[in-house]
Amino acid sequence: MAGHVAVVGATGAVGQEFLRVLEQRNFPFEKITFLASARSAGKPVTFKGKTHTVAELREDSFKGVDLALFSAGGSISRKFAPIAAAAGCVVVDNSSAFRMDTAVPLVVPEVNPGDVKSHKGIIANPNCSTIIMVVPVWPLHDVNPIERIVVSTYQAASGAGYQAMVELREQARDFLDGKKVTPKVLPHPIAFNLFSHNSKVGENGYNEEEMKMVKETRKMFHCDSIQVTATCVRVPVLRAHSESINMTFCRPIGEKQVREILASAPGVRIVDDRENNYFPMPLESTDGDDVFVGRIRQDISQPDGRGIDMFVSGDQLRKGAALNAVQIAEIL
Ligand code: A2P
């Protein structure tokens, strides 16, 4: 029993999903508090059929709170997660603020559940694209270590927050009505378009999202030698990320063995019907808990039999964020 649970960023896209996941999984607690900015204080939120009121996040919000699920952005986490931890609360933080901090465990329960034990008050929830990649990749790596991953993402608007989802809907309507489309939250038109991920591009030419996939995979796999190169792209999809993943293993591996491993891997659903050209799709992985995996095939460009290609799709707000955080809390 978690006692008193607080949801920080309760009015946001991930915050709202926290509420659905806590309700659906019947997460045990005695009391729950919903926190957001002063703008939302006093607004109603519905949870388990009851109406609650959002309170303003403040430094004294964590007195008596046992578990806090944070998803209100990096700067809020940087300021308030240490305050919450000092008040005796365990924080599961969905922002990138502490992910690469060596004192903070970074956890996907299907990959490295044991790392939760080492927490000192804060546990980081990984980046959504990283989570969706590592759920099917880890069980393969565990059997036959992976030397190199080449991943390309097709990322939904939800990753940029609730307002980005509103923007996609509004732009689609405006575009079809022949009206001028003016981006507000995202940097470019998202309806009927796609663009390189909207995070900052660094000196090496990789954007922040791509570098998260590189670094977070190494940290969770406890494997500094795994090479990852990523290209992250925002596409006009509401809330499920898809990824093309190419892997080079240490030893030869056949697609039959990959299918066998993935068939019993937790959190994975194989959707791989070549005859009907039916593979993972964001509309179908939306609202579900599993990462869909298909297009599993031997990479013909690696004649030594060490290459495998696959295509995956998973709900960004659930496994990519809220569900993973609640699963961490369940381990606690
Ligand atoms: P609010 O709705 O009051 O702005 P999203 O990523 O979907 O945009 O959601 C961000 C979440 O973080 C929202 O719940 C938002 O609350 C919350 N948030 C943003 N700024 C603050 C702040 N200064 N203090 C507390 N919560 C904040």
Image (cartoon, rainbow, N blue to C red):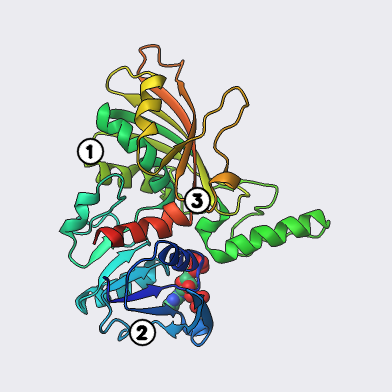
Tell me the kind of residue under disc 1: Cys
Residue 109: image location, x then y, percent? 30, 50
Q: Which residue is mark 1?
A: 223
Rendered view: 259 above or below 231: above
- How many numbered callouts? 3
- Whole-Å distance between the Cαs marked 3 and 2? 33 Å
Disc nearer the start of the sequence (1/2): 2
**Image point 37% across, 48% down: which residue?**
212
Q: Which residue is mark 2?
A: 58
- Whole-Å distance between the Cαs marked 1 and 3? 30 Å
Foreground: 206 or 59?
59
Looking at the image, the residue that sits furthest to the top is: 303
Residue 290: name its quadrant: top left
Q: Which residue is mark 3?
A: 288
Residue 75: image location, x then y, percent? 38, 70
- Whole-Å distance between the Cαs marked 1 and 2? 39 Å
Badge 2 residue CB within 8 Å of ligand 1: no
Disc nearer the start of the sequence (1/3): 1
Q: Quadrant of the N terminus?
A: bottom left
276 sits left or right of 104 in the view: right
Tell me the kind of residue under disc 2: Arg
Q: Quadrant of the C terminus?
A: bottom left
Foreground mark, 1 or 3, reads 3
Q: Mark yes or no: residue 127 visible.
A: yes
Under tag 2, what secondary structure? loop
80 sits left or right of 41 in the view: left
Under tag 3, what secondary structure? loop
